[in-house]
Amino acid sequence: MAYDQLNEICCNSKIIAKPGPNAQCCDSDAFDVDKQMCCGPVENKTILMKKSRDHLCCGRDQFDPNTEWCCLNEGLKTKPNTSMCCVNESE
């Protein structure tokens, strides 16, 4: 099906109005990469409002890499970067 690429985006075969000029797909929804982020596992993503330009995804949440860690081996939990992530002795 044809659509207006200037004002619309096709996400998973679904035509949606672009939420901003820098729109991308997050599963079947569109988000503005300048203001939002798409976080979570491949089959269960969610759109979050960016808290700052620096924030990154940590599972379905976000964290500021300037002040926090995303601890992968602790179930994707965020911690202040003044503490350490728990690691296995073999790592």
Image: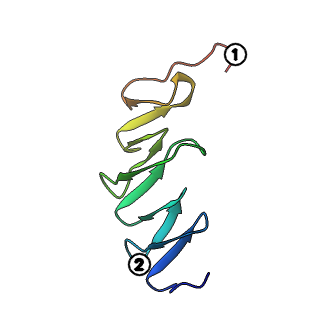
Q: Residue at x 39, y 24 (%)?
A: 83
Label 1's element? loop
Measured as percent of width and height from the top left, residue 91 is found at 67, 21
Q: Amino acid at mark 1?
A: Ser
Quarter-of-image position of residue 36: bottom left
Q: Is residue 1 above or below residue 83?
A: below
Q: Residue at x 45, y 40 (%)?
A: 60
**Label 1, on which residue?**
90
Measured as percent of width and height from the top left, residue 15 is found at 52, 73
- Kindly give the residue lying farthest to the right in the view shown: 90
Viewer-closest of 3 and 36: 3
* Horizontal arrangement in the rendering, residue 3 relative to residue 63 (left or right): right
- Kindly give the residue lying farthest to the front in the view shown: 1
* Mark 2 surroundings within 10 Å by alpha-carbon count, few (fewer than 14), some (14 through 19), many (20 or more): few
Q: Is residue 76 above or below residue 87?
A: below
Q: Is residue 61 above or below residue 14?
A: above
Q: Residue at x 50, y 67 (%)?
A: 24
Q: Which mark is residue 77?
A: none
Q: Is residue 12 above or below residue 63?
A: below
Measured as percent of width and height from the top left, residue 32 is found at 40, 67
* Horizontal arrangement in the rendering, residue 54 relative to residue 43 (left or right): left
* Mark 1 surroundings within 10 Å by alpha-carbon count, few (fewer than 14), some (14 through 19), many (20 or more): few
Q: Residue at x 30, y 51 (%)?
A: 51
Q: Which mark is residue 21?
A: 2
Measured as percent of width and height from the top left, residue 39 is found at 48, 47
Viewer-closest of 42 and 17: 17
Marks 2/1 in contact by CB < 8 Å: the verdict is no
* Horizontal arrangement in the rendering, residue 73 relative to residue 78 (left or right): right
Q: Amino acid at mark 2?
A: Pro
Label 2 or label 1, whichever comes before in sequence order: 2
